[in-house]
């Protein structure tokens, strides 16, 4: 999962806070038990002192190493049994005084070797959804709340179907894409049509479902994305260049990139080259991409390079949006 450094950093901070809260809770419980059952405090002190005390006594008695260790085990077990009985009698769990890690899978490291532990992965997923929510209003956008009643049932001859029939198919395709992400085709979607027909809404729905599955998702506009590529190429060494390099690596490596509003940017030869690099690199590496645009494939061919048009036509499922502007219909209906 190619989460950004910022998301991982925020998740690691939250993990440290959770670990500290876990330790504080354990310490508070330990103080409570010691106060209610003073003998447990004495037992814990004896357990910590058992090894040097028993070994010293064994040496005085002339016992060999094996005999000394056996005596140590017997005394430890007797103390542990006594403590367990006291805890049970007072209604506590047998391990109430044990010092346990917040996450036993990674022993609070956040990583299992080079692999991110589930405890940190869950927090990364939450931080990613939080970041996407600030951009896409994920709280109010879901496939369940998408309204088909804004799409007319009159057949458009250009498409040989009605906006309502078309959007029923588009909604089903986007839902399936999100719900079966990573396990079925197609890998890429091209959402195209005039403004106000639901492209951004359905992009947000896809982002939400895929993020909740634990995949890394990056959403950004075409203008911002190409601006970061330009900064990476032309910025001098320093924080600005480092941040731009980090951003472009996220665009190239994340599990799902949602590139919004392709065609709104000022198109230059550099932008055309950056777009081809972005699309082609993600195809070669098997990454998934959703592109939304006010341009159809015909306009894409005219505006961008033949290589870009070829990739979109051959490797993306094109989902056209048509009908009346939803924002205007909402105003009319009050």
Image (spheres, rainbow, N blue to C red):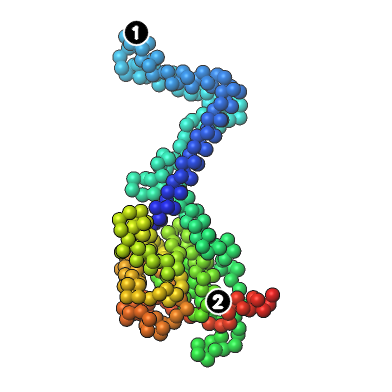
* Residue at 51% from the left image edge and 18% from the top image edge: 42
Q: Can residue 283 be seen in this view?
A: no
Q: In this view, does 199 lie above or below 217?
A: below
**Residue 251 image position (x, y, % from top left):** 38, 63
Packing grade of label 2 (10 A; few <14, some 14-19, many >=20) is: some
Q: Using the image as rendered, state which of residue 224 and residue 316 is in the foreground.
A: 224
Q: Using the image as rendered, state which of residue 320 and residue 85 is in the foreground.
A: 320
**Residue 33 image position (x, y, % from top left):** 57, 26
Q: Using the image as rendered, state which of residue 13 and residue 83 is in the foreground.
A: 13
User: What's the distance in space between the residues labelled 1 and 2, CA to CA?
Assistant: 89 Å
**Residue 86 image position (x, y, % from top left):** 57, 23
Q: Using the image as rendered, state which of residue 97 and residue 215 is in the foreground.
A: 215
* Residue at 31% from the left image edge and 78% from the top image edge: 307
**Residue 210 image position (x, y, % from top left):** 47, 62
Secondary structure of the residue carrying tag 1 is: helix
Q: Name the residue under label 1.
A: 60
Which mark identifies residue 221? none
Question: Residue 70's quadrant in the figure?
Answer: top left
Q: Name the residue under label 2.
A: 196
**Going by the image, does 133 lie left or right of 280?**
right
> Residue pushed farthest bottom?
157
> Residue pushed farthest right?
334
**Going by the image, does 212 lie left or right of 51?**
right
Question: Residue 145's quadrant in the figure?
Answer: bottom right
* Residue at 52% from the left image edge and 38% from the top image edge: 21
Q: Quadrant for the C terminus, please.
A: bottom right
């Amino acid at each position: 999962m190619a989460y950004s450094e910022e998301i991982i950093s925020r998740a690691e901070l939250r993990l440290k806070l959770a670990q500290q809260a876990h330790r504080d809770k354990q310490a508070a419980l330990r103080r409570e038990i010691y106060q209610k059952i003073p003998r447990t405090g004495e037992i814990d002190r004896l357990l910590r002192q058992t090894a040097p005390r028993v070994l010293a006594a064994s040496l005085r008695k002339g016992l060999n190493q094996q005999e000394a260790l056996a005596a140590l085990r017997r005394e430890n077990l007797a103390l542990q049994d006594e403590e367990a009985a006291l805890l049970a009698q007072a209604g506590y769990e047998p391990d109430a005084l044990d010092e346990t890690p917040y996450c036993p899978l990674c022993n609070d490291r956040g990583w299992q070797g080079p692999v991110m532990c589930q405890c940190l992965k869950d927090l990364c997923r939450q931080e990613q959804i939080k970041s996407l929510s600030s951009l896409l209003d994920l709280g109010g956008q879901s496939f369940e709340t998408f309204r088909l009643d804004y799409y007319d049932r009159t057949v458009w001859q250009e498409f040989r179907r009605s906006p309502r029939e078309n959007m029923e198919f588009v909604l089903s395709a986007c839902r399936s894409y999100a719900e079966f992400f990573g396990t079925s085709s197609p890998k890429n979607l091209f959402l195209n049509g005039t403004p106000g027909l639901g492209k951004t809404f359905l992009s947000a729905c896809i982002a939400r479902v895929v993020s909740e599955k634990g995949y890394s998702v990056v959403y950004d506009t075409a203008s911002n994305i190409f601006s970061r590529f330009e900064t990476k190429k032309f910025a001098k060494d320093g924080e600005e260049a480092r941040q731009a390099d980090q951003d472009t690596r996220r665009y190239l490596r994340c599990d799902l990139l949602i590139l919004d509003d392709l065609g709104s940017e000022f198109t230059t030869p550099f932008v055309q080259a950056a777009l081809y690099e972005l699309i082609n690199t993600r195809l070669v590496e098997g990454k998934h991409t959703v592109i939304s645009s006010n341009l159809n494939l015909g306009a894409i061919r005219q505006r961008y390079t033949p290589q870009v048009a070829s990739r979109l036509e051959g490797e993306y499922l094109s989902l056209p949006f048509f009908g009346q502007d939803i924002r205007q219909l909402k105003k009319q209906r009050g």
